[in-house]
Image (spheres, coloured by chain):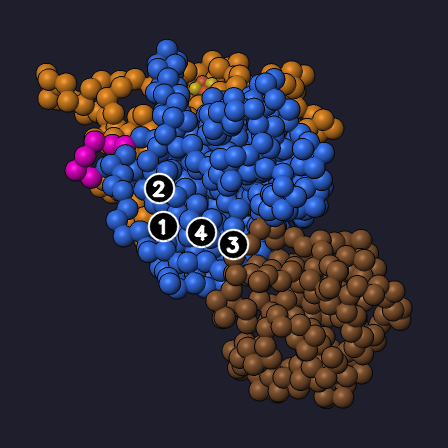
Chain colours: A brown, B blue, C orange
Amino acid sequence: MSWEITVSGFGGQGVLFIGRLLMESAFHSDKEVSWLPYYSGEKRGGMCTCFVNISDERIGSIFITHPDIAVAMNPAAMKILEPAVKTGGVLVVNESLIKNKTSRRDIKAVYVPTVEASKEVGDESVGNLVALGAVIANSQVVTTTSIIKVLNQILSKDKHQLELNKAALLKGCEYS
Amino acid sequence: MPERTLMGGNIAIAEGAILAGCGAYFGYPITPQNDLLEHMAKRMPEEDRIFLQTESELAAINMVYGAAAAGFRSMTSTSSPGFSLQQEGISYMAGSEIPAVIANIMRAGPGLGNIGGAQGDYMQCTRGGGHGDYYLITLAPSSVQDMLDYTMLAFELADKYRNPVLVMADGFLGQVVESVVIRDRVKKLPEKKWAITGAAGRPKNIINSFEMNPMDHPARIKLILQKFERMKRNEVRYEGLELEDADIVLVAYGSVARSAMTAMQKARLHKIKVGLLRPITVLPFPYQPLSDLAGRGCKFVVAEMSAGQMVEDVRIAVGNRNEIKLVNSWGGVPLTADEIFEAIDLLA
Amino acid sequence: MRKASMDGFEDMVFGKPEVMEDRPTHFCPGCGHGITQRLIGEVLDELGLQERAVCVASIGCTVTAYAYFKIDGLESAHGRAPAVATAIKRCRPELVPFTLQGDGDLASIGTAEIVHAAARGEKITVIFANNATYGMTGGQLAPTTLIGMYSSSTTGGRTVEQAGYPIRMSEMLATLDGPSYITRVSLHNPANVRKARKAIELAFRAQLAGLGLSFVEVLSMCPINWKIEPVKARQWMAENMIPQFPLGEFKCIPEVEALKKGVKG
Ligand SMILES: Cc1ncc(C[n+]2csc(CCOP(=O)(O)OP(=O)(O)O)c2C)c(N)n1
Ligand code: SF4
Ligand SMILES: [Mg+2]
């Protein structure tokens, strides 16, 4: 089994962190992984993209053009990712910033109001974890338990952030 | 299963160097290799070794020369514009037979260019790069594991031939995080009787690239050239995938080799018999295996993130016997499996 | 020069320093470089540094300085000697590296390296032979060429419009906190040669005491490129170069001051 995942949005939206959590939790279940940050300076403020491969086999390309799972955090990302997702794939859309819907019927689109949902758990800064929750709820790529394990490691020194991130993750899982 | 850990490409170069016994690192900030320098800033003092952030890449390469002349395994890392500045120092090291390792994490040029990954320094890396008659073994990693392993190998080869060795990677490989197996530390470093250690209990050691009597210079260079011949004979390395029955051979290195591998798999699903030849040493280049494949009637697709530089080496190997197609990107833009597949499809 | 060990010279009062090779130098008649190198040799003997000193030669007429000493030595690219010496000292602190650099090398192409080695307070010694010309390449304009002075690339004399002003490296470097000792001496007569020797000895003693970069600027003759006879060249240097490049100490931290007691002569 192998997964190609692309997460894209503005710098500062926590795009790379979503990718990192996916990569690390897959790594701990003995998968081959690759994680690549990619910045394209098309706009001021800059687009930030992250390519994650998860596989049982040796990984080929570290760039992903047709993801199995895509997370669009802003309209520019939506424009690129919506047509790119593989047939049968999952597209998580940050509904807080992206107003249009996909017309594709061969993919599963999940609309998540990341800003509002993350406010609900206490802080609007963890919208990325809400999106990640939606990814997990709509695919078998990794489990919430494995993500929480990684969060426990990374955020061990900041209990407040840890709880906030966990809550956002679980909130995101509701969107399936 | 050996223990694996997650690591960025640049960090793996740093850790590989530390495992290989690198005693001194000198560098100057430049994207996309800053994390390498920053990692060394932390790790080298922890290991009780020398780290210095220098005033320029010029100073860095000359410090590498000084430290290596003092008998230390030493290195610098930089990216294309900095690598251009270092050519002078590298030429001096080749001329005075000083081993060292230089990692060039390539970005897009010419000029200031772009911080995206690129492979546009191929000619500079594989044709000497600086002034005078010299070559450097140039290793081209294509995974984070390679970054670590080839850096260790680079130190070994540098000492073996008393010549600088390059690790040539693109910026994307520098940034990618993958799992790596950490290797054993090199315990015993080679003895360097020629090094600058103080003329105590032995005649003085002199390190130079110059003969007082100009008539002696050709003989000195001849020895160096013979050494390069040995390098070219003994150190060709490459990885071949599915070459046995291939009609079309992909030639790619660095991050592009990874895209090529995916393109190859896709082509195989489409019943196109494609193989991949990935040069590990781009200097010495695997001319012979490519020539043999050409003799078998294979066609070639060369994939690279440059205007088309390695394709010239493939042309040397293949001659006019068979078709060679170039698929490339430039300006800091990755080359994807889709683009490579399209090129294969056109040729099939 | 006579061989120190030559038989039949029991009454010899002037020989080569022990640390110097018994071979003729390649310098032109009246050149200052041979004197400076001899002074370094005397100091290395005096301080017993033959087994620890490292000659970091530069590019200029001192390019093969390592050939004249019985100590480890190496060449460095044009201007980069301070970087090379920095690395040697950091890797092997027990060694005593010194650079020998001309004004083209140190004050033009190598300004970044000397400034930063000085700013970091590298524990190395720099001997800077300022002869106001690019000796080795045939006497072109140097960063230290005097206003109005002939050079092969300013044949009508250096003008400010064309080439700006000469650089006073000692004064500039003395503004930095890293160096422990910065002085300018001259070779124009025997008394000043003796002062130069003392300065060089003090510079090495500063390094041995673990103090920051020690720097001796030596005003040095290049009769061939100045197109002045060797004997007159000394006089010319005293009259023309010293006004532009005044002699004296520009920096001497108290720790170096304290070392002066040990310097003979
Ligand atoms: C990169 C480089 N540029 C130029 C030269 C040519 N070159 C050799 S010596 C020299 C100038 C030397 O002048 P200086 O440092 O004052 O030494 P001097 O010969 O006067 O003692 C130059 C320009 C060189 N060897 N390398
Ligand atoms: S050219 Fe000038 S500096 Fe060079 S050796 Fe002759 S006199 Fe000395
Ligand atoms: Mg000069």
Q: Mark 1 lies on which chain?
A: B
Please report contact status of discs 2 and 4: CB closer than 8 Å, yes or no: no
**Does A75 sit left or right of B256 as displayed?**
right
**Callout 4 environment at 10 Å: few (<14), some (14 to 19), or many (20+)?**
many
Please report contact status of discs 2 and 1: CB closer than 8 Å, yes or no: yes
Q: Which chain carries label 3?
A: A
Residue type at mark 1? Ala
x%, y% of residue A97? 84, 72
Q: Mark 4 lies on which chain?
A: B
Please tell me which residue lies in front, B232 or C173: B232
The local secondary structure at tag 3 comes to: loop
x%, y% of residue C105? 51, 32
Which badge, 4 or 1, comes first in the chain's sequence?
1
Q: CA–CA distance between discs 4 and 1?
A: 10 Å
Q: Do labels 4 and 3 share a chain?
A: no
User: Toward which corner of the image does residue A162 lie, by quadrant?
Assistant: bottom right
Q: Are marks 2 and 1 on the same chain?
A: yes
Q: Which residue is drawn at 75% across and 60% down?
A: A87
Q: In which quarter of the image is ligand 2?
A: top left
Q: Which of marks 4 and 3 is in front?
A: 3
Q: Which numbered circle lies on residue A58?
A: 3
| Residue receiving disc 4 | B148
Which badge, 2 or 4, comes first in the chain's sequence?
4
Magenta segment, prevailing SS (helix, strand or loop)? loop
Q: CA–CA distance between discs 2 and 4?
A: 13 Å
Q: Which numbered circle lies on residue B20?
A: 1
| Residue receiving disc 2 | B156
Q: Residue at x 35, y 32 (%)?
A: B161
